[in-house]
Image (tube, rainbow, N blue to C red):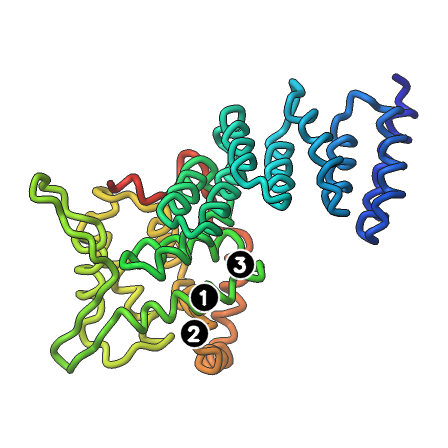
Amino acid sequence: MAQNEIDDAHEKAQQAMVLMDKHQYDNAIKILQSARKEDPKNHDYLYQIGLAYYLKQDFTNAILVFSQLIKMSDAKAAYFETYGNVLDDDKQTEKALEIYFSGLKKFPKSGSLYFQIGNIYLAQKKYNPAISAYESGIEAEPAFAPNYYRAAKLYCYSNEEVWGMIYGEIYLNLDHSNKHSAEISKLLYDVYKSEINLTSDSTLTVSFSKQKSSNKSAVIPYGIGVYEPTLELALKGIKSININSLDKVRSKFLEIYFEKGYNKLFPNALFDYQNIVKNAGHFEAYNHWLLYKGNETMFAVWQAKNKEKWEDFIVWYKANALQLNEQNKFYRKKFD
């Protein structure tokens, strides 16, 4: 095939994308069909045709296209994901699950396929299978942010908030410009406020986990054996919970966590990253950034008083964001 034909097909596909953005799906499909004739080995053009049918809610033709695509030797995870979405929107939910799971057999590291499975279970209010799917996605593809978002919300509204706090913070680091970032920032702050009870000058309680250790096991659950006791120590002398005091608490927590060697016993990619931020001199700004939505007025006052700290943090953070991969990741099942 001549290069000019391939280039022409690519140009037509670009035109089709513009038309799809304008909801002119029929015209886009015609152009994509022409592009496919010029470059028949590029199955992405067929994928875009199927996507156009899906967007115009022509589920019958979309299903015909995607049923072909997933059988191709060079099928992509996106083919299975979009096919499942089409089926789910067409009220064929169980069939959609079958397609997602079949996609995972070919793409076991696809966080997006696990995410779609979790979303179906969540819509069905099957919360345990949903969280299991999201966490499997976190384990399989650590840099895929949406699974952390869903897992954080499910855990923060459960009796095991500890995992929601960790997943939520990881999510904000991976996708801090997303529309959900403000929601998670406020959620983390609200959970701190609701689960820390400063009953008097001398007593306090924290409640981030209800998990109990088994009588048959000497293993202490992470939440009540590590996270809560460390947090209690970090809270000594704190009179109220707000963005400024939580910065002090989180800094002390990190110090104790490493002093006690928990970083060796319970490796945590998030806490390792926090330590990098702290050693770089930016932990105060990081903590205010993380929890800013909990009290925007207090954050604005702090920011105005610490303009240089804030600007230095932003510059540093852009070049030193959290990086998660197969060798550096965190998921709850590591501690089970």
Circle 1: residue type: Ser
Q: Earlier in the sequence, mark 1 or mark 3?
A: 3
Read off the residue under disc 3: 176
Residue 51, placed above or below residue 187: above
Look at mark 2 in the image and give the residue it sits on: 294
* Residue 106 percent across, percent down from the top left: 53, 24
Reply above or below: 187 against 130: below
Q: Quarter of the image containing the C terminus?
A: top left
Helix, strand or loop at label 1? It is helix
Q: CA distance from mark 3 to mark 2?
A: 15 Å
The foreground one among 101 and 308 is: 101
Instruction: Tell whether label 2 touches label 1 (CB within 8 Å).
Output: yes
Q: Residues within 10 Å of mark 1 (few under 14, many from 20)?
A: many
Q: Position of residue 203 (x, y in %)?
A: 13, 76
Question: Hey, what amino acid is under mark 2?
Answer: Gly
Q: Which mark is residue 185?
A: 1
Between discs 1 and 2, the one toward the N terminus: 1
The quarter of the image holding the N terminus is: top right
**Cα distance between the residues tagged 1 and 2:** 7 Å
Residue 136, position as x, y percentages in the image: 41, 38
Left or right: residue 118 compared with residue 7? left
